[in-house]
Amino acid sequence: MKTLLKIICNSKVKYALVLLFLLTLYIYISAYSYVSAVSADIEQSVFRLHVIANSDSKEDQSLKYMVRDSLLNYMNTLCTDTTSKEEVIQIAESHKEEFYQIAKKTIEDQGYDYDVDIKIGNFAFPTKTYGDISLPAGNYDALRVEIGEAQGQNWWCVMFPPLCFVDVSSGIVPEESKEVMKENLSDEEFSLISEENDSQITFKFKLIEFFQNNNIFTAKK
């Protein structure tokens, strides 16, 4: 123990320890700043749709997809030609009652009496993949559809850029939607969320996940 204390008290060792501490602090601050900037840009560039089932029972999960399909059919007439996130949010706000009525009718047509809660706000999401696009965990603006107790598994997509309006069974994201997303993100940010990345980009995506999932950084408006 005394030997260890002597080593620590040595001026050269103390200097090295200070340098190591400062280097570690610099790396942490740099990583934090990177995650903060990139997460904020990605989160502010998309508007998501989130449908949550009443429970994880087979029947409730099936009902969730029926509600999803009914909503997407209606939204497809409203949002496919939109050019900005703000426009989509405005449309969603002005049609909340229609969304409720469509979801409620679908539920009743299937013989259920669950209520539906339609919310538009900023919500926490885990990392999610849609086709060849992956969005890191974070807080995103979204239209949330809660069926009944909303205790079941959820389904999500992106209303802007319009990733929802594709073949949901194949999950193929159209190139037009990718182009809109590219216009709203830097080249590196788009590389982070697409599968067209290298090991360095993959590491950066994992870095964002690490900060978000461990609550080291939470981007909020």
Image (spheres, rainbow, N blue to C red):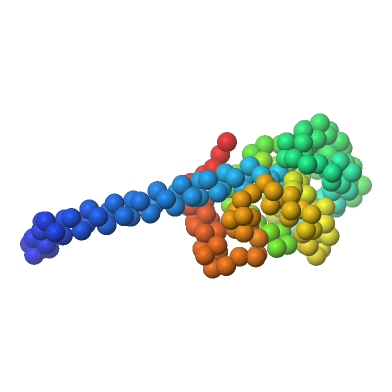
Residue 46 position, x and y percent, is 68, 45
Outermost residue toward the top in this view = 94
Which residue is located at x 86 percent, y 36 percent?
98
7 above or below 141? below
Q: In this view, does 221 lie to the left or right of 101?
A: left
21 above or below 77? below
Residue 50 in sight in this render: no
117 above or below 65? above
Residue 151 position, x and y percent, is 68, 49
Q: Quadrant of residue 205?
A: bottom right
Q: Nearer the viewer, residue 40 or 100?
A: 40
Q: Nearer the viewer, residue 162 or 109?
A: 162
Which residue is located at x 79 percent, y 54 percent?
176
Which residue is located at x 21 percent, y 57 percent?
17
Q: In which quarter of the image is residue 171?
A: bottom right
Q: In this view, does 184 lie to the left or right of 173?
A: left
Q: In which quarter of the image is residue 84?
A: top right
Outermost residue toward the bottom in this view = 199
Residue 140 position, x and y percent, is 64, 44
Residue 68 position, x and y percent, is 82, 50
Please identify the quadrant where the C terminus is shown: top right
